[in-house]
Amino acid sequence: MCNYFLKDTTHKNCEEKSHLGSEFCILHLDFPENKDGDEFKKIIKLKEEKIREKIAISDYNFEGAILANITLKDLKIDANLIFNNAQIWGDAWFQNLEISHDSHFSGAHFYGGTSFIESKVEMCAVFEKTIFENSCWFGNCNLGYHSHFIDCSFGEFTSFSKTIFGNTQFKNAIFKGQTGFSECLFKGPNNFENVQFGRNTQFGGNVFENETNFKSAKFSGFVSFDKAKFNEFSTIFDDANFDTVSFNGAQFNGDLIFTNAHFGNEIKFSCIEITGILNCENTTFKLPAMQELLCRTAKQNNENLGDRSRSDQYFFREMEAKRLQKSKILSFFEWFFVQEIFGYGVKPWRLFTAWIVFICFFSVVYYTQNGIENIHSIMDYIWLSVTTAVTPGFGGINPKPDIRIITTIEAILGTFLWAGFIATFARRYMR
């Protein structure tokens, strides 16, 4: 009997006869090293005969099988389709199948092209830790209630176009080349957490009916969500890393979350509709123009939802991005005075802190210059600095003539800072 242990199905050794004194049956027997010899051709022929024999009796358990290629087309399969841990060295065609139960391909290794075009799985499609070395097509499929592609590795081209998904899991999957999910329907929750997308990726025209999670996903090259529709639930891109991304014409009927995400290049955001909250907290950008675009959109979004505090935060980042696009000299002066001290008019406590530091600084100047006549205590220096900064006079204290130019400077700057604080405070808390 065959010594291959069927750990995922029967939990016992394969019951097929061993091949010519080998430890394994013809399906589990590895190919000879000499690919040009007669023995190699004979093994392929015997494997093909065994495949036809099993299909004729509706036995679709090929767990651990080592095959040159396989073709299953136009079949109605009233059983589980099992290829767990199988190795298929050539092309594998599973086209136009109707599988009334589950399909299991966990741990399988496909070395050639693989096609599941127009196949339908009634229950679960499980591809955990499956490796696709070459091109892979899942176009026009229906992958049942649950679709699991956790820890999968996909080759240079992968297409899921016009496929219907249930509860979808792609966590930790790797797409090495171009990937297409265009015009798909995702019915259940979708998990693309920590997925790596290579080169170009298309999600354009998709409909997501439940929560979609792209947390920590990495998009290399260009990714498109153009005209995609996200219904009611949140769409999460926390800690995601983008190169170039387009959301033109996309519709988000729930929250859109980019917390701690990073945008490396261009963002396209025209004609987008967001009815929930756009959250870009701690998002980083390589290009200031893209920070300006996304933060302006987030500002308008939160303003429309009545969250003016968060809207002010995005206004601050929008103005910061505009500053970064100016010359270095202008950018420096705006950074020091307008951004750090005045906070672009939305951070009153930053102004108040600057005013306190300003008062203390001039108090120290008056003290070191011994600038008050008839000094009684060190508090007289602080009193002089405060009254000079906020009132027209000196509060009954007479500064010495040689420091009056300093008090004049403090009076001008202090009045300016104090007025700015009042205006900013009123804008922030009384509008």
Image: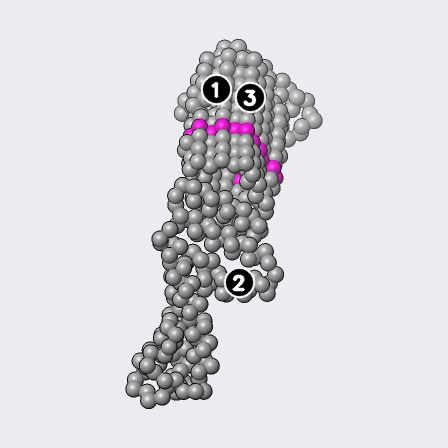
Kind of residue indicated by mark 3: Asn
Q: Position of residue 69 (x, y in %)?
A: 61, 22
Q: Position of residue 368 (x, y in %)?
A: 40, 85
Viewer can see residue 260: no
Q: Give yes or no for residue 174 being in the magenta stretch.
A: no
Helix, strand or loop for disc 1: strand
Q: CA distance from mark 2 to mark 3?
A: 55 Å
Q: CA distance from mark 3 to mark 1?
A: 12 Å
Question: Residue at point 46% right, 50% down?
Answer: 314
Does residue 297 sit above or below 17 in this rendering? below
Q: Give the quarter of the image for residue 233.
A: top left
Q: Position of residue 405 (x, y in %)?
A: 47, 81
Q: Position of residue 121 (x, y in %)?
A: 48, 19
Quick one: label 3 or label 1, which is nearer the N terminus? 1
Dot 2, crowdedness within 10 Å: few (<14), some or many (≥20)?
some
Q: Nearer the viewer, mark 2 or mark 3?
A: 2
Q: Nearer the viewer, residue 129 or 330?
A: 330
Q: Nearer the viewer, residue 183 or 77?
A: 183
The residue range painted magenta reads 196-212
